[in-house]
Structure formats: structure tokens, C-alpha cells
Amino acid sequence: MEPPERSSAYETLRKSTGSYRHMPAATDYYCHFYTLYNWLGNGFYVNNQTGGATAYFYNSGRQVIESAPADGYQRSIDWDPVYYIKNC
């Protein structure tokens, strides 16, 4: 199942279950911190944000554990240690 068409202002994240989740920037264009619930196992992410905004993944202690450049490439990730995402 492919994700629905979305604006490039959105960061698209995919869980290993095959379901897609879209993490819109707060009010579409502002930097925002998101809390993730029950995102477990291996999966993928694609950062399609415009303007080259790098997204950041944080552990439970709010320490950066991975960064996602806005290059449109799909990358694999283990969601188990990811508790938060910041879209910029």
C-alpha cells in the first residue's frame, strides 16, 4: 500500500508494519517536537521537507540518536529507541 499523496512540506514516516504516518510540521511550516507512541521494530523514513530541513530522532532522554536530511531518500531505522521526532 502506497502512502497518500502529500505536499513536500511533510515528513513521511513508515512503520515496519507497512502502514504510513505523516508527520506534518506544526501549522504546516513551523519547527515542532513530536512524541511517538508504540513505534516499535524496524521500519523506514523519508524526509521530503522543503528548504533542506533536517529532521532529528531522539531517545527517551531527549538525546539525538539520528538525523534525517531532507533529500527524499528512504532509509531504514530501528524505531525501538525513538521516542521523539523534531522536524527541523
Image (cartoon, grey):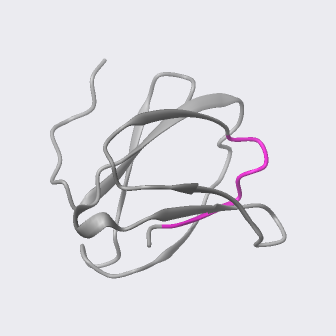
Left or right, 43 with respect to 42, comes to left
Is 46 inside the magenta-drawn segment? no
Question: Which residue sits at x=47%, y=22%?
Answer: 18
Which stretch is magenta? Answer: 79-86
Exactly how many numbered labels are in the figure?
A: 0
Q: Nearer the viewer, residue 19 or 68?
A: 68
Q: Quadrant of residue 46?
A: top left
* Main SS of residues in magenta: loop
Image x and y of residue 73, in percent: 37, 37
Q: Residue at x 22, y 63 (%)?
A: 50
Within the magenta stretch, is there residue 85? yes
Instruction: Please indicate, yes or no, whether residue 40 appears anywhere in the rendered image.
Output: yes
Q: Would you say 23 lies left or right of 1 here?
A: right
Farthest residue to the top: give it.
1
- At 71% from the left and 58% from the top, the residue drawn is 83
Front residue (pair 10, 88):
88
| Residue shown at 78% from the left, 49% from the top | 81
For residue 36, above or below residue 88: above
Could you tell me residue 76's position as x and y percent?
57, 31
Instruction: Name the spot of residue 43 as percent of width and height, x first.
Output: 58, 30
Horizontal placement of 78 versus 46: left or right? right
Is residue 14 visible in this depiction of the protein? no
Residue 61 placed where, x, y %?
A: 84, 71
Residue 15, by quadrant, is top right
Quarter of the figure with the N terminus: top left
Q: Nearer the viewer, residue 41 or 54?
A: 54
Which quadrant is home to the C terminus?
bottom left
